[in-house]
Amino acid sequence: MTRGRDGVGRTIGIIGGSGLYEMEGLADVREETVATPFGPPSDAIVRGRLGASELLFLPRHGRGHRILPSELPFRANIWALKKLGAERVVAVGAVGSLREEIAPGHLVVPDQFIDRTRGRIGTFFGDGIVAHIGFGDPVCPVLRGALVAGARAAGATVHDGGTYVCMEGPQFSTRAESELYRSWGAAVIGMTNLQEAKLAREAEICFATLALATDYDCWRQGTEEVAIADVLAVLHANVAMAKRVLHDVVPALVAPAGCGCPSALEHAIITDPARIPARVKRDLAPIIGRYVPEGP
């Protein structure tokens, strides 16, 4: 059904965050279990058709929310989506607001990230192959613009741009940390999207985040510490809005990307192809196959 780079139909990956475990309204629905060199993805991937596009839905934390942010198999998730043909990925997830104007219930489409994680693997490279990819603008501008427009059309209060602080978790911030991130000018804080953005760029996949603000973190004067019951109440309404946005945006993503994401790896691989181990070439074939063919 999806014809990819000829401009008719696209394959779109959706990484669903907290509360978003499935997408209604898909046709020709089936599940696929993908084996990857990096272990199993978070869950089986649900494939279906939405308009002229094929949608690949992956619940980030697994059905039933079983996987901590620090435990997420980021490489397996992005590798699996790439293997199944994803050209664009929208990452949906709950965040805390670091700005007064971003109220619980609002949507944010960030354009920058700050990394406050520790020890997570955020690259496909190493083990005999070196690549240094540009990441100054970590979000696809075309996909980001489509999400902003779709959110506005759906009637959401959406903030266009802003910096996402990616923290380790699973605990929420201390007040001192929250104030520090505010002093940096950050807009929202979450626990998952940065590694997804890095790996998607290496995989030459357009990537953007649809962030669902559920609380004011803990910085706001007169506000109690983050209470998970309150977060879940706001999240339920946010997820319903996110689904409306995605149902409108995904069918419209049929044109070529028009950005640099699909060729991001073109000049990034530094290693002499003859020196790359055969196993690495095989494992990374969906990622590097355009530039480094398998074989001796």
Image (cartoon, rainbow, N blue to C red):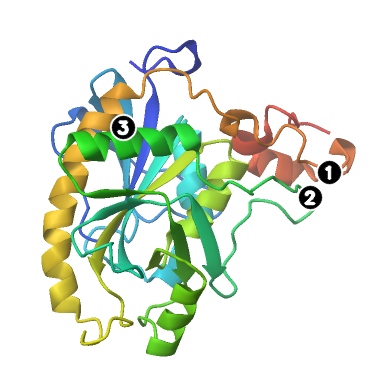
* Image point (46%, 29%), residue name: 85
Query: Does dot 1 land on a helix, a strand or a loop?
Result: loop
Residue in front for this viewpoint, 47 or 236? 236
Q: Earlier in the sequence, mark 2 or mark 1?
A: 2
Query: Does dot 3 land on a helix, a strand or a loop?
Result: strand
Q: Residues within 10 Å of mark 3 (few under 14, many from 20)?
A: many
Q: Residues within 10 Å of mark 2 (few under 14, many from 20)?
A: some
Q: Is residue 261 left or right of residue 143?
A: right
Percent of width and height locating residue 123: 63, 54
Residue in front for this viewpoint, 206 or 71? 206
Name the residue carrying label 3.
Answer: 55
Q: Earlier in the sequence, mark 3 or mark 2?
A: 3
Q: Is residue 127 left or right of residue 26?
A: right
Percent of width and height locating residue 122: 59, 58
Figure check: 11 above or below 190 = above
Amino acid, disc 1: Ile
Which quadrant holds the N terminus? top left
Name the residue carrying label 2.
Answer: 130
C-alpha gap between disc 3 and disc 2: 32 Å
Q: Is residue 144 left or right of residue 247?
A: right
